[in-house]
Image (cartoon, grey):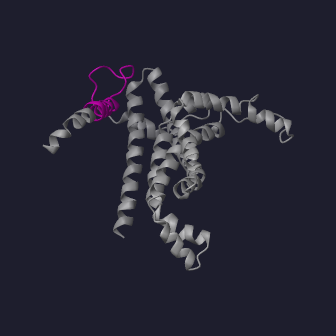
């Protein structure tokens, strides 16, 4: 009987998740009809093209580098906020929690346009920098990696904060109090007590933010430039050129990259748990 309750979920996942990826995998093993006659045999030519061309390799590396940069910034900025949320008993905690969650209820398109207003050559940031004498002329803060990284960090920071806060909240405060009684300073308590016990949350937050970053499209499309080409944009370009088969191969690479990170996280924390 319990297994029957899972039937609707299993059917849903098979229909809208497994089946589309299966079709995409098959599509990726054929050349585009524009490149090969109908009825051609399966081939790994699309994958060979992706790994054999320096341009596509550079796009793959740029995608991974963007993921690392945004994830690192979200972790550094989000950890102190998550710790404060988990430990404070102030009534203002709910206000801060609301401020953390509030960006999630705003469309990513609106948030991206907001950053365009802030970072544009005539935007708020450049206007203040020039007015305060910190810059002689407007700085190029948009249509480059800087603008994309800042916008994506803002978009994905709540996911990191909420993931970390839920784990830190589960760490007994008595452990910190005991360490303090034994003479451990704040940094020592953080390094030897809080950080090791919160690593599971760090791993989950890093994995979530990294996967969301490498799959981002709208923010990069609006705030990026000609040099900020990543896999999602490249896939969109290939579909626009009716090269759906190569786009499917790139999509499978993006999926494999995400699954590899999930597997690595599971392995790392399984080993930590066993130890």
Residue furthest out toward the front: 91
Write down the region rendered in magenta. Answer: 15-41
The location of residue 254, given as percent across then percent down, is 42, 39
Vertical comparison of 156 with 36: above or below: below
In this rendered view, identify the residue nearer to me: 146 or 10.
10
As drawn, is 105 to the left or to the right of 112? left
Q: In this rendering, is residue 45 above or below 65?
A: above
Farthest residue, direction bottom: 182
Q: Is residue 40 magenta?
A: yes
Question: Residue at the location (55% across, 52% down)?
Answer: 75
Where is residue 84? Give x, y as percent: 57, 56
Residue 57 lies in the magenta-colored region? no
Q: Quadrant of the N terminus?
A: top left
Which quadrant holds the C terminus? bottom left
Which quadrant of the structure image shows residue 242? Answer: top left
Q: Position of residue 93 (x, y in %)?
A: 56, 50
Nearest the eye: 113 or 121: 113
- Relative placement, left or right, of 57 versus 245 is right
Give the image location of residue 91, x and y in percent.
Answer: 57, 50
* Whether residue 1 is visible: yes
* Identity of the residue drawn at 47% across and 37% down: 215
Residue 225 visible here: no
Number of numbered tags placed on the structure image:
0
Who is closer to the viewer here, 190 or 69? 190
Residue sitting at x 16%, y 44%: 2
Q: Residue at x 16, y 43 (%)?
A: 3
Answer with the quarter of the image where residue 226 lies. Answer: top right
């Amino acid at each position: 009987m319990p297994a029957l309750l899972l039937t609707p979920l299993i059917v849903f996942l098979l229909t809208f998740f497994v089946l589309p990826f299966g079709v995409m995998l098959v599509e990726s093993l054929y050349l585009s009809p524009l490149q090969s006659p109908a009825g051609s045999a399966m081939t790994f030519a699309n994958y060979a093209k992706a790994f054999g061309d320096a341009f596509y390799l550079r796009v793959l590396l740029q995608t991974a580098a963007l993921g690392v940069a945004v994830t690192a910034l979200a972790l550094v900025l989000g950890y102190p906020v998550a710790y404060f949320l988990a430990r404070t008993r102030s009534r203002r905690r709910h206000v801060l929690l609301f401020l953390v969650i509030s960006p999630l209820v705003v469309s990513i398109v609106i948030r991206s346009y907001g950053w365009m207003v802030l970072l544009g050559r005539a935007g708020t940031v450049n206007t203040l920098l020039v007015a305060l004498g910190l810059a002689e002329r407007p700085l190029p803060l948009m249509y480059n990696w800087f603008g994309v990284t800042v916008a994506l960090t803002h978009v994905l920071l709540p996911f990191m904060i909420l993931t970390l806060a839920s784990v830190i909240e589960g760490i007994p405060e008595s452990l910190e109090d005991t360490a303090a009684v034994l003479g451990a300073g704040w940094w020592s308590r953080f390094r030897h007590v809080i950080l090791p016990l919160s690593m599971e949350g760090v791993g989950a937050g890093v994995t979530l933010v990294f996967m969301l970053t490498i799959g981002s499209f709208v923010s990069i499309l609006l705030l990026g430039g000609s040099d900020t080409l990543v896999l999602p944009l490249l896939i969109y370009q290939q579909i626009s050129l009716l090269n759906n088969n190569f786009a499917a191969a790139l999509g499978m690479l993006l999926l494999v990259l995400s699954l590899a990170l999930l597997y690595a996280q599971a392995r790392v924390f399984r080993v930590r748990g066993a130890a």
